[in-house]
Structures are given as structure tokens and as C-alpha cells.
Amino acid sequence: MYNLLKGKKGIIFGALDENSIAWKVAERAHEEGATFVLTNAPIAMRMGEIKNLAEKTGSEIIPADATSMEDLENLVEQSMEILGGKIDFVLHSIGMSINVRKGNHYTNSNYDFTHKGFDVSALSFHRVMNVLYNKKAMNNWGSIVALTYMAAQRVFPDYNDMADNKAYLESIARSFGYFFGRDHKVRVNTISQSPTQTRAGSGVKGFSGFLNYAEKMSPLGNASALECADYTIAMFSDLTKMVTLQNLMHDGGFSNMGISDIIMDDFIDKTEG
Amino acid sequence: MYNLLKGKKGIIFGALDENSIAWKVAERAHEEGATFVLTNAPIAMRMGEIKNLAEKTGSEIIPADATSMEDLENLVEQSMEILGGKIDFVLHSIGMSINVRKGNHYTNSNYDFTHKGFDVSALSFHRVMNVLYNKKAMNNWGSIVALTYMAAQRVFPDYNDMADNKAYLESIARSFGYFFGRDHKVRVNTISQSPTQTRAGSGVKGFSGFLNYAEKMSPLGNASALECADYTIAMFSDLTKMVTLQNLMHDGGFSNMGISDIIMDDFIDKTEG
Amino acid sequence: MYNLLKGKKGIIFGALDENSIAWKVAERAHEEGATFVLTNAPIAMRMGEIKNLAEKTGSEIIPADATSMEDLENLVEQSMEILGGKIDFVLHSIGMSINVRKGNHYTNSNYDFTHKGFDVSALSFHRVMNVLYNKKAMNNWGSIVALTYMAAQRVFPDYNDMADNKAYLESIARSFGYFFGRDHKVRVNTISQSPTQTRAGSGVKGFSGFLNYAEKMSPLGNASALECADYTIAMFSDLTKMVTLQNLMHDGGFSNMGISDIIMDDFIDKTEG
Amino acid sequence: MYNLLKGKKGIIFGALDENSIAWKVAERAHEEGATFVLTNAPIAMRMGEIKNLAEKTGSEIIPADATSMEDLENLVEQSMEILGGKIDFVLHSIGMSINVRKGNHYTNSNYDFTHKGFDVSALSFHRVMNVLYNKKAMNNWGSIVALTYMAAQRVFPDYNDMADNKAYLESIARSFGYFFGRDHKVRVNTISQSPTQTRAGSGVKGFSGFLNYAEKMSPLGNASALECADYTIAMFSDLTKMVTLQNLMHDGGFSNMGISDIIMDDFIDKTEG
């Protein structure tokens, strides 16, 4: 629409189906003039669907397990070849908790699952940047974004060990972002998005409670996947070159609300004058 | 009970009646071996009640308008005379919004009232420290505490301009705390207390909504005035000498909650499996 | 360049000279297709310079004292008339400390000056939004931005009472932003900018120290006024519709740095192996 | 000195030698009337030294690898037997980065080391609470504290993956603290301590740079290990019952400093008037 990413090259992790935020980012990046490679874990890919996205956006698909350095190295090398140069933007939208899937309560974790979920959801972000950094694969003033959730700062009981994984992920953004900024002028940020009805989000117990509560709490309501994609585009564009090491709340105002009128009404003593 | 403040001298602002946090602080400070002066605005003092407190704690009362430099200078000088030396601890528990009292909505403030409330609720803290600092009235390793509320960080719609005043107050704690620490080894902090059924708290519209919601959100429930006094004593004691420029949440965990199970239950779609 | 603000109407406060961030915002907003009114305090306007900006951007100038409700009402009404409709974006870039100008140390404030500086620097933001809100002068999904500085969160000793004013300003953004979001779908944010060599910035004592230190601390260096304008444009555009009540750090990463290698080098014991 | 922990029973992890914060906590807890068990990893224990501490404080030592559920279960069961009842306070002071030890730069991590360091430094805190919670081993109103460092929030480049581990640790405090508070009235907090010349701290490259810089930045200077122990005692005492899910800065004010006069002096242009 605006040509904001004209000529820019990217890698987008995590487009699963058309509800995925990564899917919307791919569509919007395409509209804004970018070219990019789509990637996902071989096991998570639903080739039928992602092929549609690839076709629609003129992209190639390179499967990669984000916990495998070999896969990531191959991904980055091939991407540069396909796109004809270094990378300008990367979206990390990867997360999975086996404890959640298996129904283990937070107070009763299976630590093998915790380690595996940590590796996929958090450490994968370090691995991706490790490869990009050491291969000098990013252009100066490139932009790396990972999606996160406010459970990293505050307690959402059913978010389980994903909360802790997101806290680690956000810390990686700062820690690696320092070196990436200092050495390659690349910025690294996380976007903390409203609860969103994606495949990942829907896996969380009582998810409708999240959604409804956040909708009523936020002065602008919950942000949609498409709106998150718009914001991500802004963070990839040259308009935001000096924003780095930040966790950016994209949530209709939720994060800075104590209570909204509409929610408080439910809690006022009916006998109060 | 522990002799935590044995031999320490203090000034306590804002004890109005037995529900006041400042009142509880005075009682607890007395139990812990401190001597102190009680003060309040002449207009706010209910001499009958505060005299009981003074008697019970062996304290003298010195009225002072916290927006008057003359009154504050007199207060500090007389306090040092009465107590026989420099001051070890100060509690600032002062707040008042005329816009709230007059029922002016936040979007329709009377700015004369805003200025007046700002002067009483926020700037008074600067004035108090100004006098203490310039008169070199604090002992090394003394402790200054002001009470605040989380509306300084997040929106509680009915808190009105008191939210902004508390944000300013907390900023003063940092700004003045730097100079007080650097020059006199005095620490300055704010304690951000759960909603509390005091005279001041009760003035806020829909206050029961606040209370009930916070009670259900906080894993430990709301903190009481007495518990706040205990915490304040800890902050006046020698156990916390190196804590400064901080805003300390005393709220049963409220501030770091996104949602509690009990509140989320109200928002789950009844049709969800 | 991108037509990001095509058809949007705005009001820009605070363009003083070509070093002003507001000046750059005006230039960039013009490039992006917006029309707007320029305003400043009659006393601060340097008509020669601002007329050049107005000419260059096809704007009209309406003087307004941001502490006068009458002036602000006139400004908003006239702006809607001139621009032919409601407002889409507003930039508040106003700040002034008389205590700083007069050389009063923070620990020795003149409280009349404090009140006056507070009125101009902080309360003016409330007044502006009060008028916009009550006149229903903003279009749905409009965007209001005020410029701020990190002294609102952390101590920069020479920033004096401007630190406290900025804390209050940021609180207003949240408090008023709630009502503006809830009722008119308007978002309100503050942008916390690197120290910038503007007329306002330069007034602060030891300003070169600020600049050099922040430059060395920030992985991307200090953000320039033009880069800040770019970011502001992004916040005015439709790409950021769901971001509200936020304080957005635009600082090359400074805010999340503990220490940089280059600064630490200065502090390492030379005898350390 | 005050009998603040009279009759309270505890478990203290991580006393290595007399420079350890945990060592000081043990000494202070003993002075305050507590009884407790000392524990450490078999591999880390220097039996000669810790036996002195045990003798001095009348404690028993139970070795436990904090990454082994079996060891932790044994530790908690035996502790309750030895101490004659449930536990009132627990100190977690455990941290270790193999990447740091091996000299791997953050941008070039060995991920097996990362996993191992994560297990020891962060996940161990979850394991400890898991055992305490599921064995119902904590008394109501008990207090659990873990030591952390500000690298969890801001970049200290040489802190390496310990920064990310501390972010995860602090997230565990919130996540588990919710359930521990809700179900057993137990509070869980982290104390974020100044850089401290302990065995762990000293392992970090350029540690003197940390120390000197923080000393000059903090209005009260760096907090010592003994002062940290005092603060920890306050957090174990009944004075702080309603503080939970918090990360408590114990750092002489460092965390809320932007810049101090003394540091800025180094950065001012010498030519500035």
C-alpha cells in the first residue's frame, strides 16, 4: 500500500495457517514491496496451506527446525542466495509448550518437556540470531522482531511455562540486540501482542476468558492479527531505525490498565450508594 | 516488638484517624522504640483523635500546612528540638484531590483545583525534603517514605488527577532521593499500597469495586493498613539501608498479576468445553 | 515518501526553529501527504522562522498559549475550519523549566517557578486533550503524541524539575488516553527521545555530557531529531492503530542498557589481568 | 539482634565461602533466632568451610544437586525432620554459566552449556518450589527469596547467558509465586543485588569495571553482601508478609539512575563553557 518495504529482503518464521500472525505479516510485507523466504519446522508445516501463501506472495519455502543449527545455517545461506543478497528483516513467531499440550499444571512440570519447550520457544531466537550474526547475513539497519506475550511480565496462570519462555525470549532480544546493534546496526525488538485467536493461542486453557477479559479491559479492545502485522511492518520499515532492545506492547492499551470502568462495574457492591 | 527503631527519631505526616496508615505507622513505630512528632494540616486535624494518638505514643503534635515553607521550617526545627537531635525517618502520607471532591470528571478538570491538589499531594513532598535537606536535619542513613498508589503506573479511571499527582510524587522520590543519598546517605522511597479503606481512599467513586477486584486479583489478597505499617517500619529500620529511589509495591502481588483464576472464571464463555 | 498520512489533518505544537523535533515532524508530515496547522506560544514564536516552515509545508500558523483554555479552544476550532474537518493527529512538543533557566538547583526550587513550569510542560497536555475531547475534535483512530524524556523514569540530575514534569506528562497520556480510547478510538502515547541538540535540550547544564554518554551507551547511538520525526510519523499512521497508553523509547537502545563495553572500559582497574 | 526470625525454620542454598551472600544470610538468620539447614551442590561444596558455618550457626548440612528432583525431595523431607516442622523461609542463591567459564562469547554460545546453565541457574528455582509446594512443606506466610541481578532487565554485555537465566528465574518467581500465594499464603520474591565480590561475581570478565561504575553511579554506592543479608532477613520476617511476585532492587539506587554527576563529569566536553 505504501511501498514501505520496497526492495527489502526477509525471512519469516512461523506462518502456519491464515490465522497466524506470521501469515498476515507475509501478506502485508508482500503488499509493501518486500521479497522473503517462508520457513517453519518440517513437522509443523502444512504444506498445502503454506504453499498457497508462498504462491500468493511469490516466496519460496525452506523448512527448518529452529532448534537445529544445521537447518538454520542452511536456511540463511539459501535465503541469501534466493533473495540475491543480505537480509533486511526477520520475524520470529515460534512458540510451543509440551507441558501445556500434555496438560501438566505449572506446579507439576515435566522438566524434559520444559527444556524442549524452552529450546523451541526461546532459545531458537538466540540460534537464529547467532547464525545471522556470525554469517554477517543482515544488512545494516536491518530489523529483527520476535512475537511475545505479556505473560513475560505478569501472571496469566494458564500460560504455564510459556510465560517463563517469553521472559527468556525478551531477554535474548536485549542481550543479542546489543551486539547486533553495536556491530551491524541491526535493531532487535519484541512485539507483545494482545491474546489472538491463532492455533497457538487457542491451545491455552480458558482462552476465551483471556480474550473477553482483555477486550473489556483495553480502551481500544484487543489488537487483531492483521493489526499486529501492520505494526510489524512499521518496525521493519526505515521509520523505526533507532528503536532497539524494546518490548513493544501492541495490545489496545491493556498493559497500562489497572481496571476499566466496564470491568469495575462487575465488582462494585450493589449496596453502595 | 523487635526494637527495630530503638533510639530513632521521626516525623509522621498524615495521621487523621485510626484507619489512617500513618496512624498505624505511628503506633508501630512507638512499639519499635522510636520517638516522633505527629503533624498534619491544621485544617485536616481532628484534634480529639490525634491527641489520643499523641498521648498513646508519647508524641507531640505540630500542625503544619505541607504547602507552606514557613510551617515546614517551623516543624522541622521544633521537631529536632523536641526529639533532641536530627531526624532518622519521615513518613509522607498526604493526598487530596479537589477535582475528586467536587465531582469533576478527569476529562473536565478545573485547573485551579488541579494545581491546588498537585501542591498538596505531590509538591508537598518536595517541600518537605527541601527543608530537611537544606537544614541538614536528617541523620546519615535516615529513611524517607511517601505513600503512593499504583494509579501512577496504570489507569484506574476514578482515581482522577490523583493518579498524575502520584506519578509526580514518585518522580520526586527519585529526583530528590539522588541528592539526599549522595550528600547525606539518606534513602528515599515510595510504598505503593493496596487500596485501603481509609478516609482518603473512601472518597474515590466506586471504591468498593477497587477493593473487591484487587482482593480477587491478588494471590495474597489486599494488604491492610497495619501490614503497610509493618512494611514501613522495615523500610525505616537499618535492615534496608541500601534501598533507595524505589517504588515498592505492597499489594499482595496485585501489581504483577495479569489475571487470576478466580477473575478469569467470570469471563470464560459458558459454552466453552 | 510513502503517502503514509495522505488526507490526514493535524495540529503540531512546538516548532521553534529547524533544530526542533516538531519542525522535522512538520516537514515529514508534509512529505507524507498530511495537512496541518502549526502552533506555538505567542511569546516563543520566532515569526520569521516559523513562517518559512508554514510556507514550505502549506500550513497556517495559529498562535496559542498552551496554558490558556481560551487560546486552545480557538486553536482547535480554527484548525478544524482551516483543515476542513476533524483532526487525525496532534503533536505536543512543549516544555520549559523556569527553575532551570534561572539556575535554581533542584534541591532549592522556587515553587512559583515549579508551578509555572508544570503548567507549561505537563498540564498543557491535559488542557490540549481536554479541548480536543470535549469538542469531539478528533477523528476515530486519530493519534496524539507528546514528546518526553527518560528522566521521567531515571535520575538525570541536571534535568531538574523537568524530570518530574515529564513523569506527570506521561501519566496524563495514560489517564486521558483511557477515556480518549474508550470514547473516541483515539490513541495517546509519548515518545521518549534520545537527548537532542534542540534549543530546549541545549538549555540543560552539562548537556554535552548527556549527549556523549548516551551516544557511547546506546548500541545504535543517539537518535536524531529527523529519526524521531520518522518514528512520530509511524505513530500517526494507520500502521500503529492499536498502540496506546505507551511510553515509547526512541533512543538507540539506551533505556535498556546497563553498561556498554566502551563505557565499561573506562572503569576497569588497569591492574586487572 | 532483633529476634526477627525467632522460631522460624529455613533452608539456605548456596553458601560457598564467607564472601557468599548466602553465607551472610545464614549468619544473620542465626543471629535473628532462626534455625535452618544449609545445602549446596555436592560438587560445589567446600566441606571445610561450610562446616565452619554449620558449626557456628548450629545447622546441619544436606548436600543436594538442585537439578535433581530426588536430591531436592530428600533435602526437603530431611529438613522438616531435622527442624521439627514445616519451613518458613528459603533462600535460593544458585547460579552458574558454563559458557562464561569456558569463555564462549554470548554471540557464539555452546547450546549444551546454555541448557546446563539454564538448568542450574534458573530451572532449579522451579524445581525447589515444585518440591516445597507439592510436599506442602511451607508454613502459611512463609517467604521464598531468590537472588538475581539487574542484567535480567538491562544489558551488561559480559554477564552473558546469566542475564537470560536471571530473566527466566524472575519469571518463575512470579509464575510460581501466584500459586504459592493463592494456595499456601507463601510469598515469593527476588532480590536484585548490586554487583558483589563473591566467587560467582568475580568470574565475570571485567568485573572491576562493573563494580567501579556501579559504585560511582549509585547515590549510596554498592550494597555489600552483609547489607543484602540484612535485607533478606527483612523479607523473611513478618514485617513484609504482603510483598510478593516482586523483583526488589537492592543496589544503592543504581537501577533508577540515568547518570550521576560524577560519571557525567567524565563525558562533558572540556570546551563547554
Image (spheres, coloured by chain):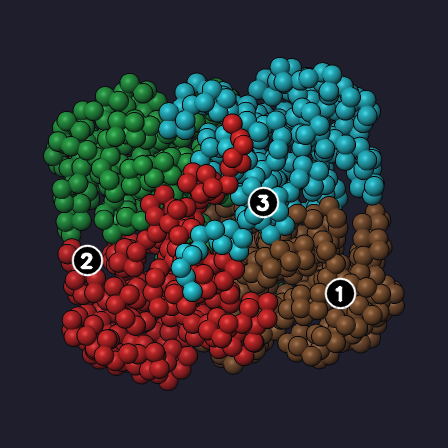
Chain colours: A cyan, B red, C brown, D green
Q: Circle 1 sits in a helix, a strand or a loop, which is it?
A: strand
Q: Residue A144's spot in the image, x, y percent? A: 66, 35
Q: Are marks 1 and 2 on the same chain?
A: no
Location of residue A169 with respect to B144 vertically, above or below: above
| Visible residue check, residue C216 | no
Please report the residue visible at 59 percent of the width from the left and 40 percent of the height from the top. A194
Instruction: Give the residue number, with chain letter if any, for mark 1.
Output: C11
Pick the front one: B270 or B199: B270
Instruction: Give the residue number, with chain letter if any, for mark 2.
Output: B4
Q: Do callouts 3 and 1 mark residues in contact (Cβ within 8 Å)?
A: no
| Visible residue check, residue D95 | yes
Please identify the quarter of the rendering in which residue C67 is found: bottom right
Location of residue D176 with respect to B10 vertically, above or below: above
Chain identifier of the residue bearing label 1 in the image: C
Q: Circle 2 sits in a helix, a strand or a loop, which is it?
A: loop
Please report the residue visible at 70 percent of the width from the left and 56 percent of the height from the top. C143
